[in-house]
Amino acid sequence: MSLRPVSRVIKSKPTIEGAGVHLRRAFGFGNTKDFDPFLLLDDFRNDIPEDYLAGFPWHPHRGIETITYVLAGTVDHADSIGNKGAIGPGDIQWMTAGSGIIHQEMPKGDDAGRMHGFQLWANLPAVSKMTAPRYQEVKSPDIPEVTDDDGTHVRVVCGSFWGKTGPVDGIAANPIYLDISVPPGRRRTLPIETTRNAFAYVFAGSGKFCNASGPLAVPTEGVKWLETVPPAEADNRSLVLFGRGDELEIQAGEEGIRFLLVSGKPLEEPVAWYGPIVMNTQQELRQAFEDLEKGTFLKK
């Protein structure tokens, strides 16, 4: 078994999206090669209604899949293919934009004014960019959960883990999306297929992600010594990007730690991206915006 090294730790940055929603972005709208097949992760936890109620009015998407995971409050949604509803605490909405969809997402806080959740964007491979759009909405009770003997708890949103398989299926990027809680002071090793890119996003508590060993020096005798690379510390709103390996190790802090663990097999395809539309070439990107102007964006 090989421990995945920590490539870097990133603190999510404040930004404003939609009609004025204040959120924090962990990554996106830049060089996302290290995150392939994922494009963007937004943390929209907010306790001030004035900073999120304007929401995300009608807007288009093409060429991607969006995954919305709600922790508190609700998000009302509707789209151009007739879907309409609301997702609440613990619910998931997985939207495949495919050839094109226009939708809106309007957040509402709970009784305490809290609106907490995340949105992840996954890229679609070239062969699926123009697939028919669809929704998968999963309610919290339908998401499998498993608790290990040491109290480590996992919600399996998508993919398979510890003998459980998440309810979201037919996703082009074949991701594994987990919500993991490790009790205070516990050290856990978690498997990840070595061919996948992987990251963890911490949203409660803190911990140390153990690092792989590396060469320190080659003495005159020719014997290679190894150093123990210090662990990477991560707390609330920190993203940990991992290198290659088939497992990671986490040491939970005094308050425990809760984080999203997301992995996927890279597509290794060119990305042409502007706003809510992600294609493979600039020509395809221009065509998408021409379709919007001509009213031909939505395909039958």
Image: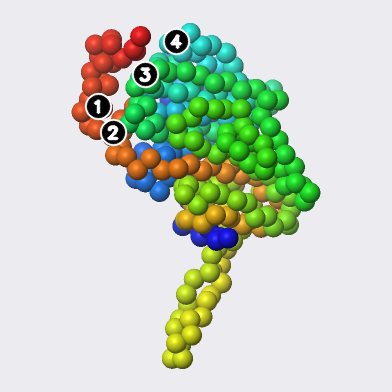
List the residue tagged with mark 4: 81
Q: CA distance from mark 3 to mark 4?
A: 10 Å
Q: Is residue 137 visible?
A: yes
Secondary structure of the residue carrying numbered label 1: helix
Q: Secondary structure at mark 2?
A: loop
User: Do callouts 2 and 1 mark residues in contact (Cβ within 8 Å)?
Assistant: yes
Q: Which mark is residue 280?
A: 2
Asked if labels 2 and 3 touch by Cβ distance under 8 angstroms, the answer is no
Work out whether residue 29 or residue 214 is closer to the camera in this orientation and state it. Answer: 214
Q: Residue furthest bottom?
A: 221
Note whether residue 23 is visible: no
| Kind of residue at badge 3 | Gly
**How far across and down, in percent of the image, does residue 260 sit?**
58, 42
Quick one: label 3 or label 4, which is nearer the N terminus? 4
Residue 161 in the image, given as x and y percentages of width and height: 63, 41
Q: Residue at x 68, y 55 (%)?
A: 188
The quadrant holding residue 158 is top right
Instruction: State how far apart marks 3 and 2 are (Cα).
Output: 15 Å
Q: CA–CA distance between discs 4 and 1?
A: 23 Å
Task: Name the mark on residue 284.
Answer: 1
Q: Mark 1: few, some, or many residues within 10 Å (few <14, many ≥20)?
A: some
Q: Amino acid at mark 1?
A: Glu
Residue shown at the point (55%, 61%) measured from the top left:
2
Amino acid type at image mark 4: Ile
Which one is in front, 181 or 173?
173
Q: What is the x, y in percent for residue 78?
A: 50, 13
